[in-house]
Amino acid sequence: MTHIFDEALREKIASRLSDFERKAHEGSGLKRAAVAIAIAPHDEGASFLLTRRAPRLNAHAGQWALPGGRLDAGETATEAAIRELKEEISLSVGKEAVLGALDDYPTRSGYVITPVVVWAKNTGAMKPNPGEVESIHRFHLSELERPDSPVFLTIPESERPVIRLLLGESHVHAPTAAMLYQFREVALGGRATRVAHLEQPVWAWK
């Protein structure tokens, strides 16, 4: 399905996120983080943004990631997502660009991540911060609706299914895959699907 980057799409996503009863995770001792699922124009259609993390980073170097990071003291998830978009990829948006949020996703490494959906209309000044991001990539929203994706794997270390989301010639795992899958289900499909139970691969547990 082709998604056009227009006001109708913006209103549909915002409406479905508003109708969705998101679940917050209140686990004690977990660090709070936020990521931005930024919806942007691309080739007469609508896309979402992913980054390749800089190869010199101490954690998860070179991996696919949504722009985001840990909340600063006194900061909300929305504020953190907006700040991280600016810091990581020089994408400036205001709070009016925020369409809603999805379920918190607790990670094996001790974080709780809040995905914040953002309408990114003006991307002309966008560029990667070389200290954090190697490159920025746009994927058409239709990539999230491929019939061969997602793939659910079993591993001996967990009873929970590991999610793998296929994108282009590559793939991503949870937490990124879980959050993008929920965005597909809720914002594009209107289906109240939960993803906190979806597992990460063992190498991402640290």
Image (tube, rainbow, N blue to C red):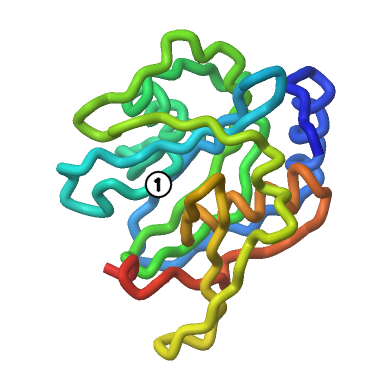
Kindly identify the amino acid type of the residue bearing the numbered disc 1: Trp
Q: Is residue 206 above or below residue 66?
A: below
x then y, percent, for residue 54: 24, 39
Tell me what residue is drawn at x 62 percent, y 42 percent: 101
Tell me what residue is drawn at x 75 percent, y 33 percent: 14
Describe residue 166's horizontal placement relative to residue 22 as left or right.
left
Describe residue 191's horizontal placement relative to residue 74 as left or right.
right
x then y, percent, for residue 142: 71, 40
Q: Is residue 185 above or below residue 206?
A: above
Give the residue at mark 1: 64
Q: Is residue 133 above or below residue 159?
A: above
Farthest front residue?
A: 169
- Badge 1: few (under 14), some or many (20 or more) residues near its Cα, within 10 Å? many
Quarter of the rendering occupied by the N terminus: top right
Q: Quadrant of residue 187?
A: top right
Describe residue 16's horizontal placement relative to residue 177 as left or right.
right
Tell me what residue is drawn at x 56 percent, y 48 percent: 167
Query: Camera-side residue: 78 or 198?
Result: 198
Query: Camera-side residue: 192 or 159?
Result: 159
x then y, percent, for residue 147: 74, 57
Query: Camera-side residue: 69 or 125?
Result: 125
Q: Quadrant of residue 7?
A: top right
